[in-house]
Amino acid sequence: MERTNLTFRGGVHPLGNKDISNRIPIADAKLPAEVRISMHQHIGAPCEPTVNVGDVVKVGQVIGQSEAFVSAVIHASISGTVKEISEIVTATGNVKAVVIEGDGSEEKAYIEEINSLDSFTPEEIIAKIKNAGITGLGGASFPAHVKISPPADKPIDTVIINGAECEPYLTADQLQMEEAPEKIVKALQALMKALSASKGYIAIEDNKPNAIGKIKEAAKGTDIDVAVFKTKYPQGDEKRIIDALLDRQVPAGGLPLDVGVVVQNVSTAIAMYDAVYLGKPLYERVITVTGDAVKSPCNIRVRMGTPIEEVIEQAGGFMKTPGKIIAGGPMMGIAQPSLHMYTLKGMGGLLCLSEEAAKLPKPTNCINCGRCVDACPVHLQPVNIAKYTERQNFEMAAKYHALDCVECGSCSFICPAKRPLVENIRLAKREIRAKEKRA
Ligand code: SF4
Ligand code: SF4
């Protein structure tokens, strides 16, 4: 049964800017001569290198792992020789990286299989996803095997593949839904089997009619439904999807599994298809390279650890002086401190804004219009959290539920005074969590 016109309370309508890249088919990036693969590409414990300088490695070979449950194994993305193990700069600090000098042979450490779901037990499906090092590729980078291993007292009845892709500019998920809809349907079937879930949905916003058509066609004859949502930001937030589709509310501080649901995004589903049906580990992903500063915006499949400078070069390079490079989209993406950065599992886009487009308007005084409150999908009072944060009163910021903020940026976007609301709320969250740790 098709569900349409689904939506949530609050949210905003930023300019989509998806037409810049949503008609460009996915292309494979040139094989990088060298990759610098971060050992910490996920939420949880970082990996330690399992290779040494001088080792010869194959594509898909394990090069980093951790004993911790909340972690994700890391694989070589090219074949070659480990040149060094050193630190690289990332937007969240310095991390250890394995540097591989490519030999171009593309020799693989795994055998590509074509498996049928019938041959696997639920435990084997989860193990395949874990061994492939899959993390949430929508940006959250949470290890996928953890998300699909709920405790026994939290049974899952519904799995949702999140194809909302509500972030402006990003089109990688849309293109993958159009080009590989069967993979997404099959990945959902695998997840439903792994979790013994009886219901499966693929959630898509109504600004992607081609993707909706292709997915519907691929899902014909299965017990999977397509759910169509009104285009509104942040519809892709998993709690907004669950609320709009199932009328279930994830409790504050809770997770979708608290209401019997698992949500995985489209890119993650494709990686799961590759892992379960083909035996392929996660060492490449599709990213959107876009923005007014690049010559030829595109959707491109890149190997992990590729220099972002090289990726931008394959989008024709810069045609304007870049003012800001953002990993992800403009609402929730992370500004990159330099061009000497490397692709990661959680990097779904490279938004390159010119100096002019990146210029932020000067904030003025709050006029108490309440628009930020109306826009907040979590029903918070961003104006009050931000005001208390500015006064360093984090106790009051906590009382206004700062920790429930999903950092969607809708409040900052809508504010006519251009107050840095989400930045202040992020700061409040950091301070509140630091205080909780000290206590
Ligand atoms: S307070 Fe947080 S959740 Fe609410 S609109 Fe602002 S960024 Fe989004
Ligand atoms: S939207 Fe901006 S100006 Fe209006 S109440 Fe919120 S912070 Fe103040």
Image (cartoon, rainbow, N blue to C red):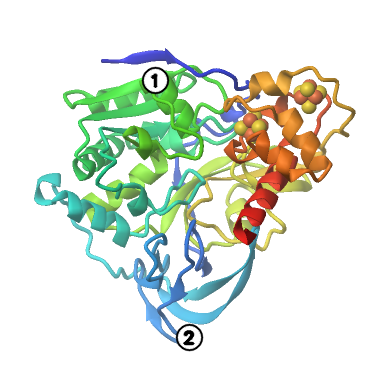
Q: Amino acid at mark 1?
A: Asp
Q: Is residue 46 left or right of residue 437?
A: left
Q: In terms of sequence position, does the residue under pointer 2 or pointer 1 come before the other?
A: 2
Image coords of residue 106 (percent x, y): 36, 68
Front-lying residue, 346 or 255: 255
Q: Quadrant of residue 354?
A: top right
* Residue located beneath label 2 in the image: 53
At numbered mark 2, what does the secondary structure look like: helix, strand or loop? loop
User: Can residue 259 be seen?
Assistant: yes
Q: Quadrant of ligand 1?
A: top right
- From this viewpoint, which residue is outermost toward the front? 439
Q: Amino acid at mark 2?
A: Val
- From this viewpoint, which residue is outermost toward the left? 119
Examine the rendered structure and indicate whether residue 436 appears above or below residue 428: below
How many residues crowd mark 2 within 10 Å: few (<14), some (14–19), many (20+)? few
Q: Is residue 234 left or right of residue 336?
A: left
Examine the rendered structure and indicate whether residue 391 appears above or below residue 216: below
Q: Is residue 216 left or right of residue 400?
A: left
Image coords of residue 128 (percent x, y): 25, 57
Examine the rendered structure and indicate whether residue 93 appears above or below residue 413: below
Mark identifier at residue 247: 1
The answer as to whether callout 2 falls within 8 Å of ligand 1 is: no
Q: Quadrant of residue 408?
A: top right
